[in-house]
Amino acid sequence: MTMARTLTKQAATGSLIGLALGDALGFPTEFNDVPSILAKCGPWREMTLPRPAIVTDDTQMTLAVARAVRTALARGVLAPLRLTRPLREEFVDWYHSPENNRAPGRTCLVACRKLDSALPWQEASQVGSKGCGANMRVAPIGLVPGLSQEQRAGAAQLQAALTHGHPTALAASDLTARAVYLLSQGAEPLGLVGQLRSYAYDNRTRYHATWLGDLWTYAGDATPQQFIRRGWDECLRALETLASALGTANPESDPCLLTGEGWIAEEALTSALLCFLLFPDEPVTALRRAACTAGDSDSIACLTGAFAGAHLGAGAWPKEWAERIEYRSELLTLGALWDA
C-alpha cells in the first residue's frame, strides 16, 4: 500500500464504523448455534444489518475508551496517570448509564462497581478473568496517531487491566491494538499473523510497571515477568492455532470450530482475525462470516470489522449501513479526529 493511500483511506473512521457494524450484525446471533442463525437469518452470505442497527456494550465501551484517550491527550502526552482517571470515569459512567442494558459481561459489571469507589484500580481488577471484554474495546488505542510502541502497548494493557486483570487479557489486548495499528498503517494481511507472533515473542517477559503498577502481585506469581509471560504464552499458542487454521479453513464452515468461540480474549482475537483473513478484500462478507458463528458473535464480528476497516478504510462499508448505525455521529467525530 502506498503512503498516499495510507493517509487518505480514513483508517480510524473505517475501523470504528466497522466495529460498530459488526457488533450490530452479531448482536441478534450471539448465544445461537449456526443452524439456529441460518434458520433465523437465512444464508449467511446474505445477512442484512438489523433495523434499527443497535449495538451492544462492545461498541459502548469502545467509545468509553476512545473518549478517555481523547481526554488524556487533550491534557498532554499519553501517560499512565493521565489516562487512568478518564478511563475509570468513563467506565463508571457506562456502568451507571441507562443505556447499559445490552447484556454486558459480568466481569465488567463487577469491576466497574468496584471502580466506583476509593479503591486502587488494581483492587477492582478481576485478575482471574481473561474475557473478551478486555479487547473488544481496545481498537481506539491502535488508531490514535503519534503514539510510541511503549505508549500503545501500555495503554492497551491498562484499559484491559481496569476490569480484566488476567495476563492473557493484557497480552491479547496489546496484540489486538497492534493488529489494528499495523493494518491502519498499510501492513499486508498476508504477513499479519507472522508480525503478531514476532511481537508476542519480543514482549514475553516485558511487564509495563509504569502502566500496571503492582497488578501482578494480586495474581500469585513469583515475579512480574512470570505473571506476564503466562499471558503471552497463551496468546502465542492461540496464534499458532490461527496460523494452522488459515491453511485448512473452509469459508463455509463456522470459524469457531478452528480457533475457539471467542468468549475469552485470545480466542476473540484469533477468531476475528480468521474471519478477516478469509476475506481480506471483502469486508462485508468477513462481517457476515463473523456474525454467523456459534461463539460470541457480536464480539468476534466487532473485532473483524475493526480489522477490516483499519485495512480498507471508511470506503469499506455500504453507505446505507454506515448511515444508520447507532452512535454514528460520535464514531464519525472520533474517526475524523484521528484520521486528521
Image (cartoon, rainbow, N blue to C red):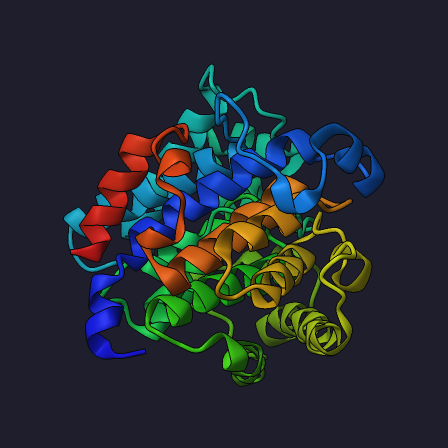
Residue drawn 66% across the image and 61% down it: 266
Task: Between residue 202 and residue 266, name the one nearer to us.
Answer: 266
Depicted 256 relative to depicted 203: above or below: above
> Residue 214 in the image: x percent, y percent?
52, 59
Residue drawn 57% across the image and 77% down it: 193
Depicted 190 relative to depicted 311: above or below: below
Question: Is residue 158 in view?
Answer: no
Depicted 326 relative to depicted 156: above or below: above
**In the rendered image, which quarter is residue 12 located in?**
bottom left
Depicted 42 relative to depicted 317: above or below: above
* Quadrant occupied by the N terminus: bottom left
Task: Between residue 309 and residue 114, name the one nearer to us.
Answer: 309
> Residue 336 in the image: x percent, y percent?
21, 48
Residue drawn 35% across the image and 40% down it: 319
> Residue 262 in the image: x percent, y percent?
70, 51
Task: Between residue 214 and residue 19, name the one nearer to us.
Answer: 19
* Quadrant occupied by the C terminus: bottom left
**In the rendered image, which quarter is residue 272 located in?**
bottom right
Residue drawn 61% across the image and 40% down it: 298
Q: Is residue 137 left or right of residue 169?
A: left
> Residue 292 in the image: x percent, y percent?
70, 44
Q: Is residue 27 left or right of residue 14?
A: right
